[in-house]
Amino acid sequence: MAITLTDSARSRIQTYLDADETALGLRFGVSRTGCSGWGYKIDMARGMSPADTVFDADGIGIYVDADSLALVDGTQIDFIKQGLNEQFVFRNPNVAGECGCGESFTTDADKAA
């Protein structure tokens, strides 16, 4: 099990952590949303639940709740700048399909249900 960060994502997240003394690390997960079913949630972690799994990405803690863990396990988080646009990009091996706008995704488990 692992969640990883590219160098550009690690650098961007570190700037957020440096600016927020209350942040423990990155909170990463999913929630039901969009036309395909799941959408990513990303924020600063300011607390830890007993059900959280914490991954260490070269000194940055990535906090994942138990309900999200199976859906995001193996994801690589990247941060991309293209012209004036900047965004986090998620390379998730569990994704079986995405909606047309790219805002939500399904997994093989969703297709079987």
Image (cartoon, rainbow, N blue to C red):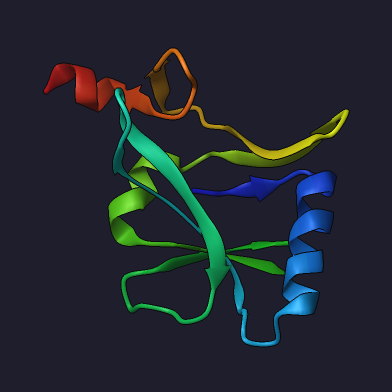
Question: Can residue 58 be spotted in the picture?
Answer: no
Location of the C terminus (image quadrant): top left
Residue 111, percent across and down?
21, 17
Height in image: 10 above or below 84? below
- Residue beneath the point at 73% across and 73% down: 17
Of 84 and 61, which appears nearest the observer? 84
| Extreme residue toward the right, this view | 83
Left or right: residue 10 compared with residue 53: right
Residue 108, percent across and down?
28, 20
- Residue beneath the point at 50% across and 27% down: 93
Height in image: 96 above or below 68? above
| Extreme residue toward the front, this view | 84
Count the numbered circles shown. 0
Left or right: residue 23 compared with residue 19: left
Instruction: Say which quarter of the image contains residue 32.
Output: top left
Question: Can residue 9 be spotted in the picture?
Answer: yes
Residue 28, percent across and down?
50, 55
- Residue beneath the point at 61% across and 79% down: 24
Left or right: residue 37 compared with residue 93: left
Residue 27, percent across and down?
51, 63
| Extreme residue toward the bottom, this view | 21
Instruction: Say which quarter of the image contains residue 80.
Output: top right
